Image (cartoon, rainbow, N blue to C red):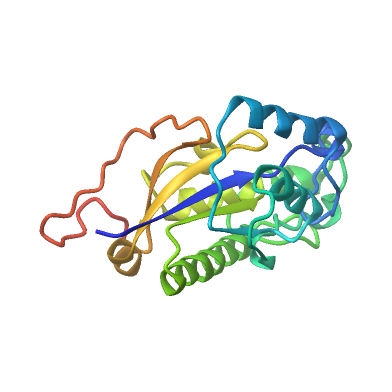
Amino acid sequence: MKGYRIVFIRHGMTEANADGRYIGVTDLPLSKEGAQALYDKLEKYEYPPAQKVYTSPLKRCKQTVSILQPNRLTVELPELVEMDFGDFENKPVSELIDTDSYRKFIQGGLDNPAPNGESLRDVVNRCYKALQIIISDMMYEGLTNVAVVTHGGIIMNMLSCFGIPKRKPMDYSCDFGEGFEVLVTASMWQRSEAFEVLCTYPAGEEIQGYSFTDPDGDSEGLPS
């Protein structure tokens, strides 16, 4: 069974991240501390070169690519951009916490966006489109090892919606410059639009709770 491996990597830290501000589509660069932290991770962990890198077009992601996956063939996908937080963009939680609109927003739900922002349903649809583009590209070009550099919220929603084991989005949260490695097989994706989450990246800690075996071609254990 041919496998396609994808590593999802969260971008490095920005000043707004350190300040606790919402910066979904706000295009900020890495902070000096954020860039240095990525170089420190390169000293601690191994980041094997990917055959191709797909990235959010925002500065913080492209700069992360230049540090962790330098001189690689890179494709920018607008579908990998973080959620648009609308009126909450570039504002700290402390400024929003006592407003009715923010209290409503943090109740969650697929169709409960920030004022003038993007709904979670729209984000999930974008995640699906991005995965279709990436996986189709890998299969067409015969790529077996690629990297996706994107945002924490995108990684959490991609893995919780399409990854096995099935977990809540926060269970797939990750630190800056880190993420998860997944295994895609043609049969599993085409039949169930799912992939197996193997381990954290780059630490390589195994994800417990699921092992894909399909001796009879059945879809037992897969999501509908």
Lateral position of residue 45 relative to residue 11, left or right: left
* Residue sitting at the far front: 71
Give the camera-side residue of 210 and 99.
Answer: 210
Residue lying furthest left in this view? 216
Q: Which residue is drawn at the image coordinates 63% and 33% (left, top)?
A: 175
Q: Quadrant of the N terminus?
A: bottom left
Left or right, residue 145 beside residue 58: left
Q: Looking at the picture, does residue 16 appear above or below residue 85? A: above
What is the x, y in percent for residue 154?
61, 52
> From the image, which quarter does the C terminus lie in?
bottom left
Q: In which quarter of the view is residue 124 placed?
A: bottom right
Q: Compared with residue 177, is residue 126 higher up or lower down, i.e. above or below?
A: below
Relative to 185, residue 9 above or below = above
Residue 173 in picture, x, y percent from top left: 57, 37
Instruction: Report whether 107 appears left or right of 26.
Output: left
Name which quarter of the figure residue 116 lies in: bottom right
Q: Which of the two residues, 224 or 10, is positioned nearer the viewer here?
A: 10
**Percent x, y for residue 165?**
36, 43
Count the marks: how many?
0
Q: Position of residue 51 (x, y in %)?
A: 53, 57
Residue at 17% of width from left, 54% of height from top?
A: 214
> Residue, x 51% and y 64% (percent of image)?
131
Residue at 34% x, 33% y: name it: 208
Q: Nearer the viewer, residue 71 or 14?
A: 71
Residue 166 occupies which quadrant of the picture?
top left
Query: In this image, 207 relative to 156: left or right?
Result: left
